[in-house]
Image (cartoon, rainbow, N blue to C red):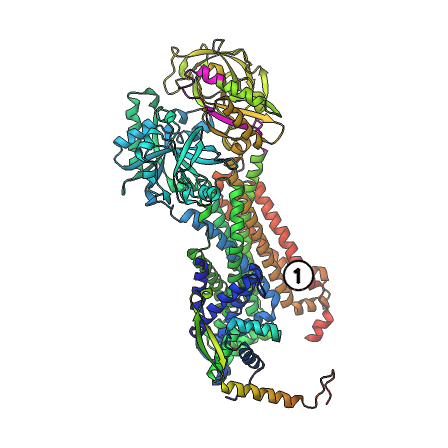
Amino acid sequence: MSDHLTDLEQMLLLAVVRLKGDAWGAAIQEELEARAERRVSLGSIHVTLGRLEERGLVVSKKGDPTGERGGKARRLYAVTETGRVALDRGRRIMKRLWEGVSPEPGLEP
Amino acid sequence: MSRSARFLDCVLRRLLPEEFADDLVGDLREGYQRRREPGPGGGSGLAAVAWWLREVVSLPYLSLRRQAGRLRAAGVRKEMTFSRGGGVMSALQLRIAVRSLTRRPLHSLVAVLTLVLSVGAGTVVFSILEGVLLRPLPYPHAEQLYLVYGTDASWKSGRSDFMRKLWDRQNVSLAMIASWRKSASGVKEVGAFAPSSVRWDDGGEPIMADGAWVAPGFFTTLGTRPVLGRLPDRDEMTSGAAVVVLGGHLWTSRYGRDPNVVGRTVPLEGRSATIVGVMPADFAVPSDHAQWWAPLPGAFASRTDLAVLRGVVRIAPGVEPATVDTELDAGVESLAVSNPSYRGKGAHTSSLRDEVVANVRQGITLIFWAVVVIVLIACVNLMSLVVARAARRRGELALRSALGAGRASLVGATLGETLVLCAVGGGIGLAFARLLLHPLVAFLVSATPGFPRADDIHIDVPVLLFALALTVGTALLAGLVPAWAASKRSPWEMLQEGRRSRGGRGVRRTQRVLLFLESGLAVVLLVGAGLLLRSELQVSAVDPGFDANVAFVEIQPGRDRYPTPGEAHDVGARAANRVATLPGVQAVGRASTLPSLGGARLTLAWRQGEPPAGAARLATVSADSGYFSTLRIPLLEGRTFTSADRADGEPVAVVSQTLARQMFGAESAVGRLLRTSSNAAETPTEADAETVRIVGVVGDVRELALVLDPDALLYRPLAQSTDRNQLLVARGAGSVAHLVEDARKKVSSEDPNLLVSDSGTLDRAVLRPLAPARTRTFFVGVLSTLALVLTLVGIYGVVAYVVSDRTQEIGVRMALGARAGNESSRVVGVALGPVILGGVVGLGGAAALSGILAGALFEVKPLDPVTYGVVLGLLVFLAAAAAWLPARRAAAVDPMRVLNEE
């Protein structure tokens, strides 16, 4: 499988990075809603993160049990080194593509 | 976390893929909590619920995405779609279904709304049915508990309707209870109680509190333990000690569940009673409103023959209630040996559970069946939609079949859409049910005074299982049959048809059968509702013969303070005079009983000069001079009583119009002489009879719920009777409800120890028995309107389908000279045929089932032609209108364009 990242995957990875160790489902959802103005269902978040975990881009572990969810623990995600490399690669690709493109309407080079 | 929340979590966890289940369910719960809490990012409960629902609805995508991702990885997507055999449902088929549904929003919306309605209504009504009728009562071995009523054979042969109805609903006396305790071997425990309503004035705002005076054995029979404190002990029960046990509701509402309430004292009917214990909130004998229980006061306890109690017994395991009835009768008979007033009397049991729900059983059952009909109509509608959809996909299915797809996979392709629809519709329906249940129950309770077990109505596990079964059942019934039919052709045949038209004759035939079915079902329900409504109109058109807009206070002057009936009457008259001084009071009267409250005495009466063997048993009411004018019972002839009709005066009587006609035909009754004997249980003799002169004739009044025949009533002056209990009635200018409270105060100011056993407004007492029927009719009416709307939606859908399916045919016809209007009518006709046929068959079905309603109808025959005619006419008219809307599109077909397309 290539290490190309989809739009959603990039956003999720970035949200996980931003949340610094407190990245769990509903928090990621709120972060995406607040920063990316994008509504993603919890189901999609978990499925996508699951796929990213299979590819070794994120790791997850159980947090401490909380009373709010009936004594169950949250699953907390963190981005691996591979993940950071993939993110960086995505950013560089985008940057290269943007080179010479004016941010003005019309977008002519 | 509430029980239902935990249950939901559990269900979700089962449905989700294992590796995500815990995290997702946890996130959902936590996310929901965060949204509910006020603060930054938090908000209202509604927003939280909306968020939760949106997340849950999107969950099916989760498994689809996973499956699709795996398939993509394995590169098997195409093989999967057209695989031979394989499972009926695959994730891909679900995914395709979701896509195809979102592409046809209107179709999907109608289907989802139909399901929401069906699952929502079904769930609400089932929760009520389950909580009120099916769940056992909250007492240990509740199935052994029975109430005991007295019987009075002389009432059975009484002349008036209400006496015959009440002959086996008499009260029992303490002597009877004692006799049963001694001799009835089938009875393990026996107790008794007298329901009562008292003024609860413990320093706060005084309220009227329902409760009961209870005889020894009451608490041990029911077997419930108090949640706080203790029950009165044996000595306190037998001596009528001033102690009281609180109900759970009163404890909560009045004392904030204060554990120190035990030991406090409250004034209870003139005595200061000590609170000794608190019962659980679901302890509800004699009614859900019962809020206190206190030992029967000594004044009652010493009068062992006073029949003012209702018995409650726990029968021994394995003993038949019929055997117990025989023993109870024998117990009363043994009393008759020493006391002739027990002759002809007996007792019988009636299961406590039946008694608790007696008022509402018929209504709830009826409403449940109405909902069953709605669910069936919804199923038929959905089926019709699915058939049309399957027809549109015929070409695609044929292609798949030709490429080797197995039948199972074709069924799956069609079933997938139905399953997705049902999951969404069922989920929203359940959410609606949950949202609506409590307001609805609150409405039921306020519309039906005495609605039992309202606290037991919840959406609990059995209800959720019912909703699930309802949804899955609907999906299978509505989806499987058409899906199977759609797959049952040879690929060649299907390809041929698929190209020629999108539907074909088979589909139209199926749709017509479905239209026929739903019209029939709707008519059955509409006829039922129509009959009930007509009956309700007949009841409200009944003139009761009196003005019930009065307040009443019932007093029971005891023998200890008022030894003779004369003294008892005097204290009643003095109390009435005090009430008359209240501002705004226009009229005051007294009588031994009031219309609809029951409890009239029996008198044997025959015309003077005729043999006593032909005597009539008459309900007799003792009344004073103010009674007739207070209740506005019209005087038709002669005079009513005056203060001159005293105990030592000439015995006089006033008769009701019906009685005058029965006894004297067309001749005037005024001035005629009657021989009367108050010993109604005996064969009448001249020896113990007295002669009374009829001085007036008054209008008839209707008893009990107004639906019984007008009574032959004999009125005697209170002063000439031996009745001690009196009902004070007062009519005022202002609010009658206030008058009740003020009148009670005035009565107590005359003698604080005077036992006030009942009070209220007469109109509420009169209307109380009518309320369950009114509520029932209202609900059946609403449900049958829903059924009608669903049917019309179905008709609209079918005609719209026919028009779009036949556009080419219509275009060709119009090109050949057919008029546009004719084309529309032809299309309408296609739908109306099965509707009319279904309607007529439905009338037949309604006629066959109408017997069920016979007992609930008043002055309307179950085969009332007007109702049947109106229902059929209404259905055909509205069906034509519903069909006409889409049919207009047939007229708008442009022949040129159609031919060009061809």
Q: x and y percent of residue B385 in the render?
A: 56, 64
Secondary structure of the residue carrying numbered label 1: helix
- The answer, for residue B757, to whether it is visible in the render is yes
Disc 1 chain ID: B
Q: Residues within 10 Å of mark 1 (few under 14, many from 20)?
A: many
Q: x and y percent of residue B136 in the render?
A: 38, 47
Q: x and y percent of residue B683 in the render?
A: 37, 17
Q: Amino acid at mark 1?
A: Pro
Q: x and y percent of residue B593 in the render?
A: 48, 24
Left/right placement of residue B295 relative to residue B853 reads left
Residue drawn 63% across the image and 63% down it: B800
Q: Quadrant of the C terminus of chain B?
A: bottom right
Q: In the image shown, does B865 or B261 lie closer to the viewer?
A: B261
- The answer, for residue B662, to whether it is visible in the render is no
Q: Quadrant of the N terminus of chain B?
A: bottom left
Q: In the image shown, does B809 or B177 lie closer to the viewer?
A: B177
- On whether residue B149 falls in the magenta region, the answer is no
Q: Residue B101 appears in which quarter of the rendering?
A: bottom right
Left/right placement of residue B706 relative to residue B563 reads right
Question: How many marks can you see?
Answer: 1
Give the magenta range. Answer: B541-570
Looking at the image, is B767 positioned above or below residue B393?
A: above
- On whether residue B547 falls in the magenta region, the answer is yes
Residue drawn 50% across the image and 20% down it: B572
Q: In the image shown, does B287 or B320 lie closer to the viewer?
A: B287
Residue drawn 46% across the image and 68% down it: B26
Q: In the image shown, does A17 or B733 lie closer to the viewer?
A: A17
Left/right placement of residue A95 relative to residue B333 reads right
Q: List the residue tagged with mark 1.
A: B886
Q: Residue A104 appears in which quarter of the rendering?
A: bottom right
Looking at the image, is B40 positioned above or below residue B236?
A: below
Looking at the image, is B162 positioned above or below residue A58?
A: above
